[in-house]
Image (cartoon, rainbow, N blue to C red):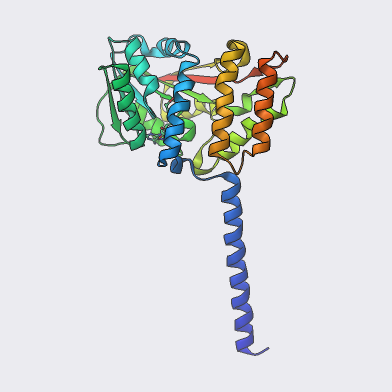
Amino acid sequence: MTGLGTGYVALFCLFFFAASCYLSLIIFVKKRGPPMTNFFQDPEFTQLLDEQLQRQVDVPWPEEAECLQGHGMQAACRVLDVGTGNGYFLCRLAKQYPDKLFVGIDQSEQLIQAAEKWKQRLGVCNVEFMTCHCPNLEMSDLFDFAFARFCIYCAPNRRDVLSWALGRLKPGARFCVIDVDVDADYTDPPEPAWSDMIDAGRRAMLSGGSDRTIGKKLPALLYRAGFVDIRLEQRFWYSSFARTRAEFVGYWRSTGVIMRRLFADIYTQEMCDAFLAFMDRFEKGVDTVITNPIHVISGKKQV
Ligand SMILES: C[S@@+](CC[C@H](N)C(=O)[O-])C[C@H]1O[C@@H](n2cnc3c(N)ncnc32)[C@H](O)[C@@H]1O
């Protein structure tokens, strides 16, 4: 083979290699879904999220608020909510505890706008919202209590966020994380329509550093960030045995529908139909127990 011929073969191999890498990357990204951070810039997603976040708060209210009280909020005057989203949870807290001042921060400008609307709609004045990506080194305020509700699982820089949260606390104050762990989700007897939905959620949010199995990892993450006196509990407010059938089905049916709209590539129409059919069967009284634990972990800043 001439030198020129060898050159062409090498060029062809190089081209073939680059094309395969590109194709694999596309398949990989498609399989895992778009990065989570992109969702929070998308107005349609923000609108859907606003509705779903409201349901997610109303279903267990006020158990969750009382749970935060038990993890260190009770004695606090100034409370920080990291990744406040649409601020609905924080506005309800502000209404429930008018003697405290609440500050909610989120990286998404659209969600902070939604939070300002909730503040007006619920008529609360002891709450402030700020667009802010954590860790934010300009923020120097100190708080008596801070929490992050369903934020750490979708924060790829979660170690930095936790260290930063520690720095935002007064000595002796606590930080509480409320988050998911889909590995702990369990149905008795096994229900494929349910586990397909949970698994699709896990896969859809994998990329961009989201981790829907974060619950079990949080004690170690808090410890490594420098927190002491770490307390952990599981709560079951989205589980079938903690709700009436109507409440349970209302919440999860809308979760299935929103999943289908958001993650159409991963959560197929067939899966969604099977899930909704299961919800119908469940509403009519099928004997299935669904355990969907929520992890609540808090740690203290050393005095
Ligand atoms: C699933 S939402 C939960 C919203 C709210 N905490 C609730 O429980 O309704 C997670 C929120 O965390 C925010 N978030 C994630 N990482 C963040 C970061 N590093 N800084 C600020 N906000 C962040 C996202 O923008 C999103 O609004």
- Percent position (x, y) of residue 55? 48, 21
When asked about the image quadrant of residue 159, the answer is: top left
At a point 46% along the width and 39% down the height, the residue shown is 156
Answer with left or right where residue 287 lies relative to residue 115.
right
Q: Quadrant of the N terminus?
A: bottom right
The answer to which image quadrant residue 248 occupies is: top right
Using the image as rendered, state which of residue 57 and residue 37 is in the foreground: 57
Q: Nearer the viewer, residue 29 or 255?
A: 255
Ligand 1 location (quadrant): top left
Residue lying farthest right? 189
In which quadrant of the rendered view does residue 133 lie?
Answer: top left
Above or below residue 196? Residue 145 is above
Residue under the image location 57 percent in, 55 percent down: 26
Judged left or right of residue 190, residue 276 is left
Residue placed most toward the observer, 187 or 162 = 187
Q: Residue at image x 33%, y 29%?
A: 105
User: Is residue 133 visible to the viewer in this orientation of the structure?
Assistant: no
**Vertical placement of 223 versus 21: above or below?**
above
Where residue 191 appears, as percent x and y from the top left, is: 72, 25
Residue 260's x, y, as percent? 58, 36
* Residue visible at 55% across and 26% down in the picture: 254
Q: Name the quarter where the C terminus is drawn.
A: top left
Give the percent coordinates (x, y) of residue 231.
Answer: 48, 16
Q: In the image as oriented, which residue stretches furthest toward the bottom?
A: 2
| Total numbered labels | 0
185 and 122: which one is in front? 122
